[in-house]
Each structure stands twice: as structure tokens, then as C-alpha cells.
């Protein structure tokens, strides 16, 4: 691989690692949610991240790069699920912006296949961000309602 592709390959490799970690984080978050619809939505989003990682790995292989270091298995999440959903949503927005700049870099290197993969991943990351923020909002409302109902029930018990 020529030196001109080194920066592109590094960006693709960083995106691959980020997608692998996001898939793990969302799977862990799904296991925490009590709402079965929310769990299912998170599992679908985790599957999208794995698909993104697979596309990126294929592009890296086509560029003659690999093997890649595997991200650590241990990922710690904060106890506040709503905060973690919002954090992952913000991360998805940032990933979409990185994919946009990586797609532009790929076009500069005349690597239209990598540009296409990055643009596809970018739009899906934007969707993932919206979905995660909606899940966070729903979880926050459910927590607030549960808090209100338990507070209303507490004086009746005493």
C-alpha cells in the first residue's frame, strides 16, 4: 500500500475499532433495559454496528491492511442507563462526522468504494444517534413516572 493510503487506512481502522466497541456497549445496555421493545431496538442497533465493522474490515482487507488489534473485552458502563444512552448517542453523532471526513479523504485518494462505505455508515450513524436519544428520552420519562408513582404511594403507606 502506498504512503498516500496510510492515513485513510488508519482512519478506517479507528472506525472499525469504534464500531466493535459500540456494538458491545449497546449489547450491554440492551441487557439492562426492562422494556423489551427498547432491548430489541438496541440489539438491532448493535447489529448495525457489527455490519459497519464488517464493511470497514472488507475495505481494509482490499487495501492490504490487517490484521487489526482486537479491542478489549472489558467495557465498563455507568450505572445511569439514561446517561449511557445519551453518551452513546453523542458518540454516534461524532462517528457520523468522522465518517463524513473519512469519506472525503477516500474520495481524495480516488477510493470510491471506501467513500461509499463511509457515507453509508455515516447515514446509519446519524439514524443510530436519533434512535439512541429517543430511547434515552423514553427511559428518562419512565424513570420519572416511576419516581412520581412511588413518591405518591409513599405517604399513603405511612
Image (tube, rainbow, N blue to C red):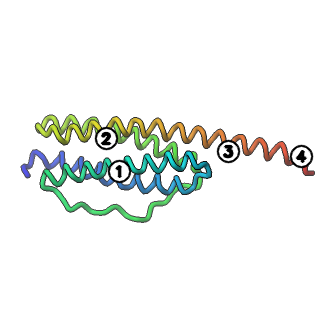
Mark earlier in primary sequence (1, 2): 1
Circle 1 crowding by C-alpha within 10 Å: few under 14, some 14–19, many from 20: many
**Crowd around label 3: few <14 · some 14–19 · many ≥20 (10 Å):** few
Disc 4 + disc 3, Cβ < 8 Å: no
Callout 1–callout 2 Cβ contact below 8 Å = yes
Q: Residue at x 37, y 64 (%)?
A: 72
The circle on residue 155 is: 4
Q: Is residue 60 above or below residue 130?
A: below
Say if mark 2 contacts mark 4, CB within 8 Å: no
Say which residue appears at 18% left-offset and 45% top-offset.
8
Please report whichever mark, 2 or 4, sits nearer to the chain's N-terminal start: 2
* Extreme residue toward the left, this view: 2
Q: Secondary structure at mark 3?
A: helix
Q: Earlier in the sequence, mark 3 or mark 1?
A: 1
Q: Label 3 vs label 1: CA separation?
A: 29 Å
- According to the picture, the residue beneath numbered tag 1 turns out to be 19
Instruction: Name the mark nearer the viewer: 2 or 4.
Output: 2
Farthest residue, direction bottom: 73
**Mark 1 and mark 4: Cα distance apart in space:** 48 Å
As measured in the structure, the alpha-carbon distance from the residue carrying label 4 to the one carrying label 3 is 19 Å
Q: Are marks 3 and 1 in contact (CB under 8 Å)?
A: no
Residue at the disc numbered 3: 143
Give the percent coordinates (x, y) of residue 152: 83, 42
Residue 19 place in picture, x, y as percent: 35, 50
Labels 2 and 3: the sequence-earlier one? 2
* Disc 1 and disc 4 in contact, CB within 8 angstroms: no
The mark found on residue 111 in the picture is none
N-term-proximal mark, 1 vs 4: 1
Q: Which residue is mark 2?
A: 121
Amino acid at each position: 500500500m502506498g504512503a498516500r493510503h496510510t492515513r485513510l487506512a488508519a482512519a478506517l481502522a479507528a472506525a472499525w475499532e469504534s464500531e466493535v466497541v459500540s456494538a458491545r456497549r449497546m449489547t450491554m445496555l440492551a441487557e439492562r433495559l426492562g422494556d423489551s421493545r427498547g432491548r430489541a431496538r438496541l440489539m438491532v442497533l448493535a447489529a448495525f454496528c457489527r455490519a459497519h465493522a464488517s464493511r470497514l474490515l472488507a475495505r481494509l482487507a482490499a487495501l492490504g491492511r490487517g490484521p487489526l488489534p482486537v479491542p478489549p473485552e472489558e467495557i465498563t458502563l455507568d450505572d445511569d442507563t439514561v446517561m449511557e444512552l445519551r453518551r452513546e448517542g453523542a458518540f454516534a453523532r461524532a462517528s457520523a462526522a468522522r465518517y463524513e471526513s473519512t469519506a472525503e479523504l477516500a474520495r481524495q485518494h480516488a477510493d470510491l468504494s471506501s467513500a461509499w462505505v463511509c457515507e453509508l455508515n455515516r447515514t446509519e450513524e446519524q439514524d443510530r444517534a436519533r434512535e439512541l436519544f429517543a430511547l434515552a428520552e423514553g427511559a428518562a420519562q419512565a424513570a420519572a413516572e416511576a419516581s412520581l408513582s412511588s413518591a405518591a404511594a409513599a405517604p399513603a403507606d405511612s
